[in-house]
Image (tube, rainbow, N blue to C red):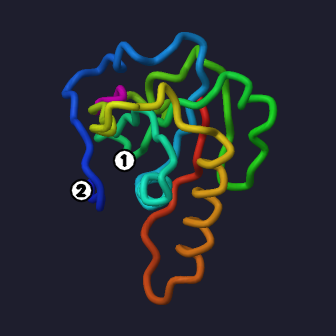
Amino acid sequence: MTLRSDHLWRIAVAEQPPSSLPAGLASVQVGLALGLPATDTLVADGTNVGPVKYCLTHHRLVVPVEADTVHRWRAAHSDCVPAARSRNCAAGGYRGCNGVWVTRPSTDRAAVTPADALHEALSLARARLRKAPGPHPRLHEARCA
């Protein structure tokens, strides 16, 4: 598995999220094939991106967003659920979620990624993947936990 990005990230090899995350958040969960290009687009556009968890077991991203996102997320490519399940990718099965948290190295790090910007970036990344010629990477439906 390649976790490729065109931007710098700090890697924390820990299951616990960074201490900068406020309590009571929701988290968008999305497959790497869709989530990596979307988060790279946000960084390239200058959007403050908060901590992101890479689940190495299930090949998914967990992106914390504002708590009120649960009630307004409504997207074909994703779901959103409240904070109770927001720290793991909730892919199911008998294997737990194992991953690393990454953060942007800037001093003005965001506590969370803006949900509206993430929704737009995921939608654009999904459209690009659907239009790409040849074999498509495996797309996982996004989930927000």
Q: Residues within 10 Å of mark 2 (few under 14, many from 20)?
A: few
Q: Main secondary structure of the magenta part?
A: loop
CB atoms at circles 2 and 1 under 8 Å apart? yes
Q: Is residue 55 visible?
A: no
Instruction: Choose between 115 and 46: the one closer to the eye.
Output: 46
Toward the viewer: 31 or 20? 20
Corner quadrant of residue 58: top left
Is residue 23 rendered to the left or right of residue 52?
right
Q: Position of residue 85 (x, y in %)?
A: 55, 20
Q: Residues within 10 Å of mark 1 (few under 14, many from 20)?
A: many
User: Percent from the top left, x then y, of residue 5?
Assistant: 30, 58
User: Residue 51 is drawn in which quadrant?
Assistant: top left
| Magenta stretch, residue numbers | 95-99
Q: Indicate which disc residue 40 carries.
A: none
Judge by depth and name the residue closer to the eye, 140 or 42.
42
Q: CA distance from mark 2 to mark 1?
A: 8 Å
The relative height of residue 39 versus residue 111 in the rendered view (above or below) is below
First reached walking from the N terminus: tag 2 or tag 1: 2
Q: Residue 135: x, y in percent?
A: 43, 82
Name the residue tied to disc 2: 1
Q: In the rendering, at what x and y percent does residue 2 appear?
A: 23, 58
Q: Residue at x 26, y 43 (%)?
A: 9
SS at badge 2? loop
Which quadrant holds the C terminus? top right
Q: Name above or below for residue 131 compared with residue 32.
A: below
- Specify the farthest residue to the front: 107
Q: List the residue tagged with mark 1.
A: 59
Residue drawn at x 24%, y 56% is 1
